[in-house]
Image (cartoon, rainbow, N blue to C red):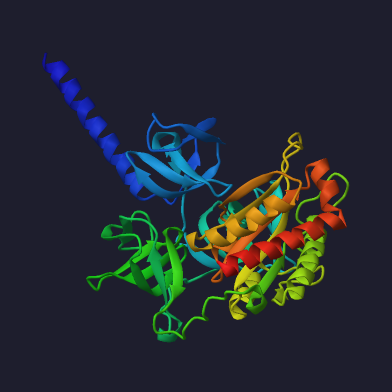
Amino acid sequence: MRKKFIFVTILSIALIAAGIMVTFAMAHANSVSVEAEVLNVRSGPGLAYDVTSQVRKNDVLQVIGEENKWYKVRLDNGDSGWVASWLVKNTTVSAASNSMAVVTSEGGLNVREKPSADSKVLGILNTNDQINVISEQNGWAQIQYQGQNAWVSSKYITIRQSTTKSDAKDLQRVTIRSNATNIRNKPDLSGSVIEKADSGQSYEIQGVQGDWYQVETSSGELGYVANWVVDISSNKNSAPQKSKTTKLSEATIVLDPGHGGNDPGAKGEMGTVEKDVTLKTAKAIKNKLEQAGAKVIMTRSKDEYVSLRERTKIASENQADAFVSLHYDSVEEGTGDISGQTTYYYKNRDQSLATSINNSLGDALAISNRGARVGDFYVVRENNQPAVLLELGYLSSKIDEERINSGSYRSQIADAVTSGLANYFSN
């Protein structure tokens, strides 16, 4: 009987210790690595929730929340979901986690799908491009690239101290999107919650560290809020914003032909290159908008590389009334039957712009309309101006590719975008 009591006591202590270890590990996780061969991603923190997708062994996921021993993670496609903490392990995260870095390599830096030199190249970053480093492991830095998790070699970047105190004239404000948003005592999900903010509540930005804004709470204490749960607006003491444009003829539109230079984008079976057709499409839209009296600025007017940061900067410097990024989609081999156009936005404020343009495209194009939806793309996420990203067909679809190469199709797109913008401003 005594032996049984001792065994039960030891077992209880072990279980409690295990629970403490799981809790401790969860509290310090910035990213996790999948240990199971296949891991279900669920719509909520529990086995009762629906499976929304799956991830594979050794995939590294960014942690953006935690509840009931489940991690809320950001997936490669920009979506989020929940995974069981006991089926993943925390990756070793350096002091650079959630920090800004600058590309230092000459001649460009390959962005890869996995932390390996043999992994698929997703794109190329140029010297002096700024990137946000989520974590580092084994000589590789995890970053966000075109709405998905990706990797670059740590040898070719320089981490910057990213917490900065801004001049008063440069301060902006963050506005909370959802009720019960956490303000933490440090720029990390492991930070203690020092205040809960409700939708519509705003704070002045005191500084920036990686994916977190430093703010002053209602009690006067400095805290941090994640950039994916807030919207940015100008400081109340800054120069007054330009009044809302009500006519297309009074508007400044920035057109952004996707890709360019050493970044070709997608390629169709017939040899169509995305960077070429986005430029042709932008020029067609530009002609239509200028005929309607709008001022049009192009982020590029020839085959050249322009960084994502520079594209959003052009919109900000010109106080654009709308920023429209143009792309053509593609999917893996064997799924060439997927067709259609999609309109993406990131911030709630831009939903009406996206809906207006998407409705016009849906009415004008003989192609399926996949709707206006949220997309975590840099040029819409980091844009201070109203911004949308248009995927105007699939280069992986033979039918779509034929349309995309048609001048009449680009003319229809130009008419539809012009009409959508006109409706947006008039309403």
Left or right: where 164 falls relative to 302: left
Give me the residue at 87% from left, 49% from top: 271
Q: Work out whether 341 lies above or below 6.
A: below
Give me the residue at 21% from left, 31% from top: 13
Name the residue nearer the viewer: 396 or 400. 400
Q: Work out whether 115 lies above or below 100.
A: above
Which of the 4 quarters of the picture holds residue 358? bottom right
Position in image of residue 306 (x %, y %) = 71, 69
Q: Is residue 38 visible?
A: yes
Which of the 4 quarters of the picture holds residue 139? bottom right
Give me the residue at 71% from left, 75% from top: 296
Position in image of residue 326 (x %, y %) = 71, 60
Position in image of residue 12 (x %, y %) = 21, 28
Q: Work out whether 17 lies above or below 383.
A: above
Give me the residue at 79% from left, 64% from top: 279
Left or right: where 386 falls relative to 326: left
The residue at the far left in this view is 2
Q: Which image quadrant: the C terminus? A: bottom right
Name the residue nearer the viewer: 223 or 270. 270
Q: What is the count of numbered marks?
A: 0
Q: Is residue 262 visible?
A: no
Position in image of residue 226 (x %, y %) = 41, 60
